[in-house]
Image (cartoon, helix red, strand yellow):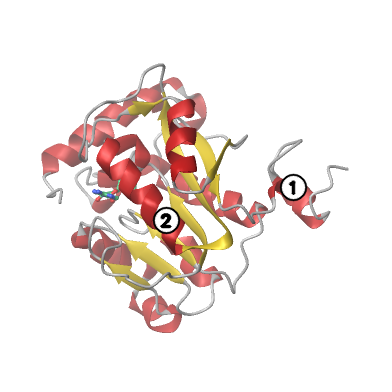
Amino acid sequence: MIKYTSTVAKKHASTEHRYIAKNAQTEATLPDGYDWESYRAYVGPPEEYDVFSAMVFNLLTSLGLRQHHRILDIGCGSLRLGRLFMPYLNPGNYYGVEPNQWLVEAGIQHETGQDLIQIKKPVFCFADSMAEFTQPLALNYAVAQSIFSHCGNDLLENWLSEIAFHLQDDGALLATFLLGDRDYSGDGWIYPECVCYRPETMATIASKYGLGFDILDWAHPRQTWALFSKPGYDKRLIQGGPIGWNRLMRNGDDE
Ligand SMILES: C[S@@+](CC[C@H](N)C(=O)[O-])C[C@H]1O[C@@H](n2cnc3c(N)ncnc32)[C@H](O)[C@@H]1O
């Protein structure tokens, strides 16, 4: 389990900040005296916190996420994604797994408030695996935003194996990873540094656990989105054209 240190948060923030400096659209608009060592900086550039929330919520809803669906947020951190998913989903349908409990507590304190937790009854697991869930959760979706970019081989395999166990037969995992020419060869959790994998490697590991692998046309500031799907997943919304709201409304027809 990774322990919070201000050094990790600062390093993560400054590494990711280099990218932002190049992108004129994402000028920092933080309050004076913003605390860079906070729960926001720990999971990525704090001034992009809102963008990541929107990117993931829009992706999932464009692929058909509905209120009655059950979703697992892997490495849910300070609820950057959960703060939008929880109000949307029916009570009890948001699961968050996160080894750093303090991040979830800070997310509840500063982002969602306790009332939302009382109303929507999310299920949190403070661990780095799903070992405590011995029965399948029958998930419709799982999401791993900026998780595989920090996973060594052992963790990547473990997450894909556990997700395959917990997804319904027509369910899917949406995950980001860093594309590389060569695969990272080590094990363990690497943070805040990142690791790369080749798409071929991702596809091979996915198929080992009965999951399909497709790269998605959905922009991310630095990483690549992929869909790891169970055989029954309907791919009409991700193939043959861009993912989008209009397409969803037309039941997958492009025009
Ligand atoms: C870059 S942050 C992304 C957080 C969140 N997914 C988001 O997009 O806001 C990585 C998160 O993974 C958590 N984490 C640490 N070890 C992990 C592990 N072995 N498996 C999954 N997540 C882990 C970290 O505590 C942190 O919250």
Label count reads 2
Camera-side residue of 41 and 27:
41
Q: Crowding at label 1, few (<14), some or many (≥20) Cα neighbours within 10 Å?
A: some
Mark nearest the camera among 1 and 2 is: 2
**What residue occupies the far top of the structure in this picture?**
181
Mark 1 and mark 2: span between their CA atoms?
22 Å
Q: Amino acid at mark 2?
A: Ile
Q: Amino acid at mark 1?
A: Arg
Camera-side residue of 137 and 2:
137
Q: Position of residue 176 (x, y in %)?
A: 45, 39
- Quarter of the image for residue 136 reads bottom left
Residue 62 drawn above or below residue 67: above
Residue 178 seen: yes
The label shown at residue 163 is 2
Q: Secondary structure at mark 1?
A: helix
Tell me the residue at 11%/45% (across/down).
5
Q: Is mark 2 within 8 Å of ligand 1?
A: no
Q: Position of residue 20 (x, y in %)?
A: 40, 27
Q: Crowding at label 2, few (<14), some or many (≥20) Cα neighbours within 10 Å?
A: many
Name the residue beneath numbered marker 1: 236
Q: Position of residue 253 (x, y in %)?
A: 84, 47
- Residue 246 as seen in the image, left or right of residue 204: right
Residue 164 drawn above or below residue 186: below
Q: Quadrant of the C terminus?
A: top right
